[in-house]
Amino acid sequence: MSTWLITGCSTGLGRALAEAVIASGDNAVVTARDAANVQALADTAPERVLAAALDVTDSAQVAAAVRQADERFGGIDVLVNNAGYGYRAAVEEGDDAEVRTLFDTHFFGTVAMIKAVLPGMRARRSGAIVNISSIGATLTPVGSGYYSAAKAAIEGVSGALRGELAPLGISVTTVEPGAFRTDFAGRSLVQSATVIDDYADTAGKRRKENDTMHGNQAGDPAKAATAIIEAVKSPEPPAFLLLGPDALALYRYSAQARAAEIEKWEKLTSGTDFES
Protein backbone atom coordinates (compact mmCIF):
# COMPACT_ATOMS: atom_id res chain seq x y z
CA MET A 1 0.00 0.00 0.00
CA SER A 2 1.39 3.39 -1.05
CA THR A 3 0.78 6.79 0.51
CA TRP A 4 -0.04 9.66 -1.83
CA LEU A 5 0.03 13.38 -1.03
CA ILE A 6 -1.92 15.37 -3.59
CA THR A 7 -2.08 19.16 -3.64
CA GLY A 8 -5.17 21.02 -4.79
CA CYS A 9 -7.88 18.42 -4.17
CA SER A 10 -10.90 20.72 -3.85
CA THR A 11 -12.06 20.30 -7.43
CA GLY A 12 -11.02 19.21 -10.89
CA LEU A 13 -8.17 16.87 -11.66
CA GLY A 14 -6.87 16.94 -8.08
CA ARG A 15 -10.18 15.79 -6.67
CA ALA A 16 -10.63 13.14 -9.36
CA LEU A 17 -7.16 11.82 -8.62
CA ALA A 18 -7.82 11.79 -4.88
CA GLU A 19 -11.02 9.81 -5.43
CA ALA A 20 -9.24 7.32 -7.68
CA VAL A 21 -6.36 6.82 -5.25
CA ILE A 22 -8.78 6.24 -2.38
CA ALA A 23 -10.81 3.79 -4.49
CA SER A 24 -7.62 1.88 -5.31
CA GLY A 25 -7.06 1.14 -1.63
CA ASP A 26 -3.98 3.30 -1.14
CA ASN A 27 -3.47 5.85 1.61
CA ALA A 28 -4.04 9.46 0.66
CA VAL A 29 -3.27 12.86 2.14
CA VAL A 30 -5.81 15.11 0.42
CA THR A 31 -5.16 18.82 0.68
CA ALA A 32 -6.74 22.17 0.01
CA ARG A 33 -6.27 25.66 1.35
CA ASP A 34 -9.44 25.03 3.37
CA ALA A 35 -9.36 21.46 4.68
CA ALA A 36 -13.15 21.52 5.05
CA ASN A 37 -13.38 21.34 1.26
CA VAL A 38 -11.74 17.90 1.24
CA GLN A 39 -13.06 16.47 4.52
CA ALA A 40 -15.74 14.53 2.66
CA LEU A 41 -12.98 12.64 0.88
CA ALA A 42 -11.38 11.71 4.19
CA ASP A 43 -14.74 10.61 5.57
CA THR A 44 -15.05 7.94 2.87
CA ALA A 45 -12.13 5.98 4.36
CA PRO A 46 -10.95 7.66 7.57
CA GLU A 47 -8.42 4.94 8.34
CA ARG A 48 -6.63 5.55 5.03
CA VAL A 49 -7.30 9.21 4.22
CA LEU A 50 -6.13 12.38 5.94
CA ALA A 51 -7.51 15.82 5.07
CA ALA A 52 -4.97 18.59 5.57
CA ALA A 53 -4.96 22.35 5.12
CA LEU A 54 -2.30 23.31 2.62
CA ASP A 55 -1.49 26.54 0.87
CA VAL A 56 1.64 25.65 -1.10
CA THR A 57 2.86 29.24 -0.85
CA ASP A 58 2.95 28.97 2.97
CA SER A 59 6.17 27.26 4.10
CA ALA A 60 4.76 26.46 7.54
CA GLN A 61 1.74 24.69 6.03
CA VAL A 62 3.95 22.79 3.58
CA ALA A 63 6.09 21.49 6.47
CA ALA A 64 3.01 20.71 8.58
CA ALA A 65 1.27 18.71 5.82
CA VAL A 66 4.35 16.57 5.21
CA ARG A 67 4.84 16.07 8.95
CA GLN A 68 1.22 14.98 9.38
CA ALA A 69 1.62 12.50 6.53
CA ASP A 70 4.79 11.09 8.08
CA GLU A 71 3.20 10.77 11.51
CA ARG A 72 0.00 9.18 10.23
CA PHE A 73 1.32 6.88 7.51
CA GLY A 74 5.06 6.66 8.06
CA GLY A 75 6.07 8.59 4.95
CA ILE A 76 5.01 9.76 1.51
CA ASP A 77 5.51 7.45 -1.45
CA VAL A 78 3.94 9.61 -4.16
CA LEU A 79 3.78 13.42 -4.30
CA VAL A 80 1.47 14.96 -6.87
CA ASN A 81 1.94 18.69 -7.39
CA ASN A 82 -1.42 19.65 -8.82
CA ALA A 83 -2.39 22.88 -7.03
CA GLY A 84 -2.78 25.81 -9.36
CA TYR A 85 -5.08 27.94 -11.46
CA GLY A 86 -5.27 29.59 -14.85
CA TYR A 87 -4.22 33.14 -15.60
CA ARG A 88 -4.97 35.00 -18.80
CA ALA A 89 -3.64 38.30 -20.05
CA ALA A 90 -1.64 39.59 -22.94
CA VAL A 91 1.95 39.89 -21.75
CA GLU A 92 1.66 43.68 -21.71
CA GLU A 93 -1.61 43.47 -19.76
CA GLY A 94 -0.25 41.24 -16.98
CA ASP A 95 -0.33 42.61 -13.46
CA ASP A 96 3.09 42.25 -11.77
CA ALA A 97 1.67 41.22 -8.39
CA GLU A 98 -0.70 38.70 -9.97
CA VAL A 99 2.12 37.19 -12.03
CA ARG A 100 4.33 36.83 -8.95
CA THR A 101 1.49 35.10 -7.12
CA LEU A 102 1.01 32.80 -10.10
CA PHE A 103 4.67 31.77 -10.00
CA ASP A 104 4.60 31.47 -6.21
CA THR A 105 1.78 28.95 -6.52
CA HIS A 106 2.77 26.98 -9.58
CA PHE A 107 6.56 27.03 -9.54
CA PHE A 108 7.83 27.95 -6.08
CA GLY A 109 5.00 26.02 -4.39
CA THR A 110 5.90 22.93 -6.41
CA VAL A 111 9.57 23.31 -5.49
CA ALA A 112 8.69 23.76 -1.80
CA MET A 113 6.68 20.54 -1.79
CA ILE A 114 9.45 18.63 -3.55
CA LYS A 115 12.06 19.82 -1.06
CA ALA A 116 9.79 18.90 1.84
CA VAL A 117 9.25 15.27 0.75
CA LEU A 118 12.69 14.46 -0.63
CA PRO A 119 14.51 13.81 2.68
CA GLY A 120 12.08 10.96 3.43
CA MET A 121 12.14 9.59 -0.10
CA ARG A 122 15.94 9.68 -0.21
CA ALA A 123 16.17 7.89 3.12
CA ARG A 124 13.90 5.11 1.81
CA ARG A 125 15.51 5.14 -1.66
CA SER A 126 12.07 5.08 -3.23
CA GLY A 127 9.28 7.38 -4.27
CA ALA A 128 7.55 9.10 -7.15
CA ILE A 129 7.01 12.78 -7.88
CA VAL A 130 4.35 13.85 -10.37
CA ASN A 131 4.31 17.47 -11.52
CA ILE A 132 1.18 18.60 -13.34
CA SER A 133 2.10 20.92 -16.17
CA SER A 134 -0.06 21.80 -19.18
CA ILE A 135 -0.03 21.45 -22.95
CA GLY A 136 0.19 25.24 -22.75
CA ALA A 137 3.85 24.90 -21.80
CA THR A 138 4.45 23.49 -25.28
CA LEU A 139 1.93 25.56 -27.26
CA THR A 140 2.35 28.94 -25.47
CA PRO A 141 -1.07 30.18 -26.66
CA VAL A 142 -1.71 33.90 -26.88
CA GLY A 143 -3.25 35.26 -23.70
CA SER A 144 -1.65 32.53 -21.60
CA GLY A 145 1.98 33.57 -21.75
CA TYR A 146 2.48 33.85 -18.00
CA TYR A 147 0.68 30.59 -17.24
CA SER A 148 2.68 28.82 -19.95
CA ALA A 149 5.89 30.28 -18.54
CA ALA A 150 5.09 29.05 -15.03
CA LYS A 151 4.41 25.55 -16.33
CA ALA A 152 7.53 25.59 -18.51
CA ALA A 153 9.56 26.48 -15.42
CA ILE A 154 8.16 23.40 -13.69
CA GLU A 155 9.13 21.26 -16.66
CA GLY A 156 12.69 22.62 -16.62
CA VAL A 157 13.11 21.74 -12.96
CA SER A 158 11.46 18.35 -13.47
CA GLY A 159 13.92 17.34 -16.16
CA ALA A 160 16.95 18.10 -14.04
CA LEU A 161 15.33 16.59 -10.95
CA ARG A 162 14.66 13.31 -12.76
CA GLY A 163 18.35 12.92 -13.54
CA GLU A 164 19.35 13.77 -9.98
CA LEU A 165 16.91 11.34 -8.37
CA ALA A 166 17.01 8.36 -10.74
CA PRO A 167 20.12 6.86 -9.05
CA LEU A 168 18.26 7.12 -5.72
CA GLY A 169 15.26 5.10 -6.85
CA ILE A 170 12.90 8.09 -7.12
CA SER A 171 10.98 8.79 -10.33
CA VAL A 172 9.85 12.16 -11.66
CA THR A 173 7.01 12.47 -14.16
CA THR A 174 5.82 15.64 -15.86
CA VAL A 175 2.19 15.51 -17.00
CA GLU A 176 0.85 17.76 -19.78
CA PRO A 177 -2.96 17.53 -19.84
CA GLY A 178 -5.04 18.91 -22.64
CA ALA A 179 -8.53 20.30 -22.04
CA PHE A 180 -10.42 18.47 -19.29
CA ARG A 181 -13.86 19.27 -17.92
CA THR A 182 -12.82 21.02 -14.72
CA ASP A 183 -13.17 24.53 -13.29
CA PHE A 184 -9.90 25.58 -14.93
CA ALA A 185 -11.58 27.82 -17.53
CA GLY A 186 -14.35 28.88 -15.16
CA ARG A 187 -14.20 29.58 -11.42
CA SER A 188 -10.47 28.88 -11.19
CA LEU A 189 -9.48 31.23 -14.00
CA VAL A 190 -7.97 34.62 -13.13
CA GLN A 191 -7.37 37.33 -15.70
CA SER A 192 -5.85 40.80 -15.62
CA ALA A 193 -8.07 43.80 -15.06
CA THR A 194 -6.09 45.73 -17.67
CA VAL A 195 -7.53 45.39 -21.16
CA ILE A 196 -5.68 46.82 -24.16
CA ASP A 197 -7.79 47.06 -27.30
CA ASP A 198 -4.90 46.28 -29.63
CA TYR A 199 -4.96 42.69 -28.31
CA ALA A 200 -8.70 42.17 -28.86
CA ASP A 201 -8.14 39.76 -31.76
CA THR A 202 -5.39 37.75 -30.05
CA ALA A 203 -5.29 37.53 -26.24
CA GLY A 204 -8.72 39.13 -26.01
CA LYS A 205 -10.37 36.12 -27.60
CA ARG A 206 -9.22 33.97 -24.66
CA ARG A 207 -10.76 36.12 -21.95
CA LYS A 208 -13.52 34.61 -19.84
CA GLU A 209 -16.22 36.63 -21.49
CA ASN A 210 -15.18 35.34 -24.92
CA ASP A 211 -14.30 31.75 -23.97
CA THR A 212 -16.78 29.03 -24.93
CA MET A 213 -14.62 26.14 -23.72
CA HIS A 214 -15.75 25.98 -20.08
CA GLY A 215 -18.06 23.01 -19.50
CA ASN A 216 -17.53 21.68 -23.02
CA GLN A 217 -14.07 20.12 -22.69
CA ALA A 218 -13.87 16.57 -24.01
CA GLY A 219 -11.45 15.34 -21.35
CA ASP A 220 -12.80 13.22 -18.47
CA PRO A 221 -10.90 13.98 -15.21
CA ALA A 222 -11.67 10.51 -13.86
CA LYS A 223 -9.93 8.88 -16.84
CA ALA A 224 -6.99 11.26 -16.46
CA ALA A 225 -6.70 10.21 -12.82
CA THR A 226 -6.68 6.54 -13.76
CA ALA A 227 -3.97 7.19 -16.34
CA ILE A 228 -1.77 8.99 -13.79
CA ILE A 229 -2.08 6.12 -11.32
CA GLU A 230 -1.20 3.59 -14.00
CA ALA A 231 1.84 5.62 -15.03
CA VAL A 232 3.09 6.00 -11.45
CA LYS A 233 2.67 2.30 -10.70
CA SER A 234 4.35 1.11 -13.89
CA PRO A 235 7.80 -0.49 -13.57
CA GLU A 236 9.36 2.51 -15.33
CA PRO A 237 7.22 5.65 -14.84
CA PRO A 238 7.46 7.99 -17.83
CA ALA A 239 9.49 11.18 -17.72
CA PHE A 240 6.77 12.90 -19.74
CA LEU A 241 3.10 12.02 -20.11
CA LEU A 242 0.56 13.71 -22.36
CA LEU A 243 -3.08 13.34 -21.33
CA GLY A 244 -5.85 13.60 -23.89
CA PRO A 245 -6.03 13.09 -27.65
CA ASP A 246 -6.11 16.87 -28.06
CA ALA A 247 -2.82 17.21 -26.18
CA LEU A 248 -1.29 14.48 -28.34
CA ALA A 249 -2.39 16.08 -31.62
CA LEU A 250 -1.34 19.56 -30.55
CA TYR A 251 2.04 18.35 -29.29
CA ARG A 252 2.74 16.58 -32.59
CA TYR A 253 1.69 19.66 -34.55
CA SER A 254 3.97 21.84 -32.44
CA ALA A 255 6.89 19.44 -32.82
CA GLN A 256 6.47 19.33 -36.60
CA ALA A 257 6.25 23.12 -36.82
CA ARG A 258 9.37 23.51 -34.68
CA ALA A 259 11.25 20.96 -36.81
CA ALA A 260 10.28 22.84 -39.97
CA GLU A 261 11.47 26.14 -38.48
CA ILE A 262 14.79 24.57 -37.48
CA GLU A 263 15.29 23.21 -40.96
CA LYS A 264 14.42 26.56 -42.55
CA TRP A 265 17.13 28.33 -40.56
CA GLU A 266 19.63 25.47 -40.43
CA LYS A 267 22.28 27.27 -42.51
CA LEU A 268 22.23 30.32 -40.24
CA THR A 269 22.24 28.12 -37.16
CA SER A 270 25.21 26.08 -38.33
CA GLY A 271 27.41 29.02 -39.33
CA THR A 272 28.41 30.33 -35.91
CA ASP A 273 31.62 28.40 -35.09
CA PHE A 274 35.14 29.81 -35.39
CA GLU A 275 36.67 29.16 -38.80
CA SER A 276 39.13 26.25 -38.62
Image (spheres, helix red, strand yellow):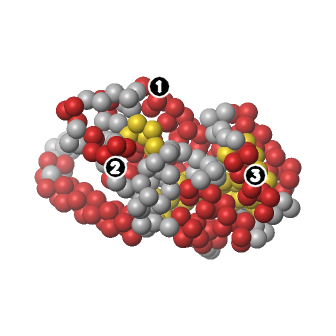
Q: Is residue 173 above or below residue 137?
A: below
Which amino acid, by three-letter code, is at mark 1? Ala
Q: Is residue 37 above or below residue 46?
A: above
Which amino acid, by three-letter code, is at mark 3? Gln
Place residue 212 in its image quadrant: bottom left
Q: Secondary structure at mark 1?
A: helix
- Residue bearing mark 3: 39
Q: Nearer the viewer, residue 39 or 161?
A: 39
Q: Nearer the viewer, residue 199 or 106?
A: 199
Disc with the residue nearer the chain's start (2 vs 3): 3
Disc with the residue nearer the chain's start (1 vs 2): 1
Place residue 253 in its image quadrant: bottom left
Q: CA distance from mark 1 to mark 3?
A: 32 Å
- Residue bearing mark 2: 211
Bin the neighbour count of mark 3 within 10 Å (Cα to Cα): few under 14, some 14-19, many 20 and up: some
Disc with the residue nearer the chain's start (1 vs 3): 3
Residue 137 at x, y percent in the picture: 39, 50
What mark, if any, has residue 97 been given in the picture?
Answer: 1
**272 left or right of 81?**
left
What mark, if any, has residue 226 been given in the picture?
Answer: none
Bin the neighbour count of mark 1 within 10 Å (Cα to Cα): few under 14, some 14-19, many 20 and up: few
Residue 72 at x, y percent in the picture: 86, 53
**132 left or right of 267?**
right
Q: Is residue 96 above or below residue 257?
A: above
Residue displayed at 67% across by 60% down: 18
Q: Secondary structure at mark 2?
A: loop
Place residue 264 in its image quadrant: bottom left
